Image: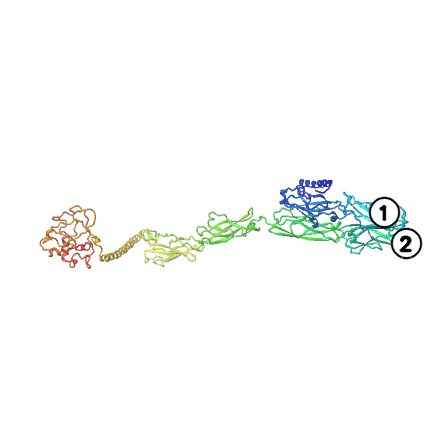
Amino acid sequence: MAGRPGPSRRRAAGRALLPAVLLCLCCRAAPERIRYAIPEELGRGSLVGPLARDLGLSPAELPARKLRVASAAKRQLKYFSVSGENGNLYVSERLDREQMCGESPSCAVSFEALVQNPLNVFHVDVAIHDVNDNAPAFSKAALHLDIGEWTLPGARFPLEMARDADVGSNSQLTYQLSSNPSFSLAVKESPGGKTQPELVLERALDREKQSSFELVLTAVDGGNPARSGTVQVRVNVTDANDNPPVFSKSVYEARVRENLPPGSPVLRVRATDADAGSNARVSYSFGNVPDGVRALFSVDSESGEVRTAGPLDFEERSKYSFGLEARDGGGLTAHCEVQLEITDENDNAPEITVLSVSSPVPEDAPAGTVVALLNVNDADSGENGQVSCELSGEAPLSIVASSGGSYKVVTASALDREQAAEHRVTVVARDGGSPALSSRTALVLEVSDVNDNAPVFEEAAYSAYVAENNAAGAPVLRVRARDADAGANGRVSYWLAGGSAGAAPYVSVEARSGAVYAQRSFDYEQCREFAVAVRAQDGGAPARSSTATVRVFVLDRNDNAPRVLWPAAGAGAEAAAGAGPFEVVPRSAEAGYLVAKVVAVDADAGRNAWLSYELVQAPEPALFRVGLHSGEVRTARAVSERDAAKQRLVAVVKDHGQPALSATATLHVVLAESLQEALPELSERAAGADAPAELQFYLVLALALLSALFLLSVALAVVARVRGAGPPAVLRCLGAQRFSVAGAAFPADFCEGTLPYSYNLCVAPGRAVAEGAWLPPPLPSLPAEELLGGEPCGKPSPSSSAGAGEPPADADAPQVGKPARSRSSPRAFPSRRPLFPGASRGGGAGAALGRVPARERRHARALRLPLDALSHRKVRVAP
């Protein structure tokens, strides 16, 4: 450290190194006192010491440990500061030892160095060494002495002492007097260790020769370099006053309580003078004393009584030492020293300074964790300055005393944020005075959350009741879990964590709200209940979770009708056909005879599955009855001979649902004494059963034919109307009956010439007809001679009256001049449609002859065509 003496530097370095080594060995478990020594008057920014290194902290640790200085006395913090970069301690304000510590022989500044993570405190003392920066000073510019000419040589006259504000060797003064043959300087040791300069008369004075002397008194201190101060001593040679005043004591001592009101007497000094008259009158005054003494005390010039002029404060200064001067009327003086000791009173309450508070504190902090550092200082001394601290308030905290008036507030037990998010305690510091004084300060400690609580469901197991046939997505229930933690640690999400076999597809859970929804429609008959596990997990790290069981009960609805097991659903039809089961009841059966039992089941449950039976159809309603709940069919009375042998009973089975569903059962009963007697009845029933079935078949067939005929009629009407409009010529040759293009060979001349009509014949392009083959005529063929001979052209033939549809006498006889009919040739299908309106289908050709012209009938016969064939053939007769 610049500016310090070499030995002091080495001693300070040695004192600072030892605690640092001890800190490293003890892993900084307990606070140590770090000491530095520096001279006063160092400039701002001067290095005091490597505080971080002496505390065992590396530069890399400084940002995390947050090294800083703190002190209970705020005025001391302005002198020093710690660098955040290297951790060195620097001077931040001018240091004046005399201003800081006054006349105290030692001067030191104490403060605390705090480090975080973990929180710890170290005590630092910086000793301020004095430098010779103050010169000796006299309170007066000149000293006046009156010495009578009759004074004998060797007489001594006390002079005012110089005052040096420095301490130690820097304040040890030596005096020098300017050379003069009449006077010399002598030094007298005072009880307080100070030197009193005295003027010694070396030879007798003669006022007539020299009435005054001018001397210079020089005070030199022991500093290096030395500083000095001077004062002029003026000696006035007088006559007659040959006795100086004399104090009764050279040192006056007194004990004075602090806080005395101004004007309170302190002590009285007394000086006597052996002279008489005005030379014996003594006046008192302060000698060379600081201005602070003059402000606190006053001296009565006549009586020599010292009184308080201002408030005395033990905490500021506990001792005062100053000089008083007694002067007689002749100018002779005497000096004495007054030493006052200020006694302490309990006028200062303890002062609590909160150095550091670690808030918030995680709730999982172990017991003994330091959460706050306090410094308690009482300016009083003795018992008045002995302080005890305690905590008031219900909190898991305790206070532990440390060295140097520091206290640590530590956790006494585990913290739980869920029980108390913050703790408010009051630190009470009380001194040992009488009466005791105390002070208080409040501490607020926040507890930060740790994910130490798992979500807790409101219920360990949930039950939900859902009616079957519900809609997919319908809400089932809502689960809710609460987490006592805060923030993300208390944010709960839900999901399915398993359940009974096959239960996962049934429901889903919403992650945020915990609402459980149905994923599908439930069926009571397939699944009556199922269970799923819902897990609730918080958002902490690591996450915590808990599980609750949700059991869903499916409620039945009446959605299933009763099902008849016996007699089976098809048994009635089979019995009606003669192949199904039947019951034989002897005619001798009495009332209550068990005929059969209708067996039915219902897949529903509860009231929906309660079945009741009722007989709704019977040939003899009074003959049979059915049990309401048993389904047993019994005879209601005895069977008589008048009862029909065959009985068909219909029973209805109903459940008790809302609305009720039902099913029917058909039972066939035969009244006979034995099975052999019942067989004929069954056979007749079977035969009779065939007739209705055959009749039903024919009815259906007739209905189909009528529908087909109606559609055909509509189609033919449409075609007839279209043909009446005149189709193209190319379509006129298309008829239903076609013949081969090979026509009959006719002579070139008939009667008077060619046949007066020409015909266009259209035949179907079927398979090829062998050359010389003829299509079979629909009517018997006539020889050519009959066509050409006998009757002149234009006259009717005798055979023209024959019906067009009459067959020939010998249909199989070969025709003269014509080839035989080919068996493989296609037959002509004559149209049944009449050629002319009003011609009936069954009337034959004769009914239409009256409407067909004779000429066309002749040509038709010549071509061997039936008359009704003209409706499907386009016959054009050329004129």
- In the picture, measured across the screen, residue 758 lies left or right of residue 365, that is left
Mark drawn on residue 276: 2
Whether residue 253 appears in this view of the structure is: no
Using the image as rendered, state which of residue 861 and residue 214 is in the foreground: 214
Measured from the top left, where is residue 477 in percent x and y?
50, 53
Measured from the top left, where is residue 25 in percent x and y?
67, 40
Amino acid type at mark 2: Ala
Callout 2 crowding tier (Cα within 10 Å): few <14, some 14–19, many ≥20: few
The figure's colour scheme reads: rainbow
Q: Secondary structure at mark 1?
A: strand
Using the image as rendered, state which of residue 250 and residue 802 is in the foreground: 250
Q: Which residue is identified by label 1? A: 199
Amino acid type at mark 1: Leu
Q: Secondary structure at mark 2?
A: loop
Measured from the top left, where is residue 315 in percent x and y?
75, 51
In the rendered image, the quadrant that contains the N terminus is: top right
Residue at image point 46% right, 49% down: 505
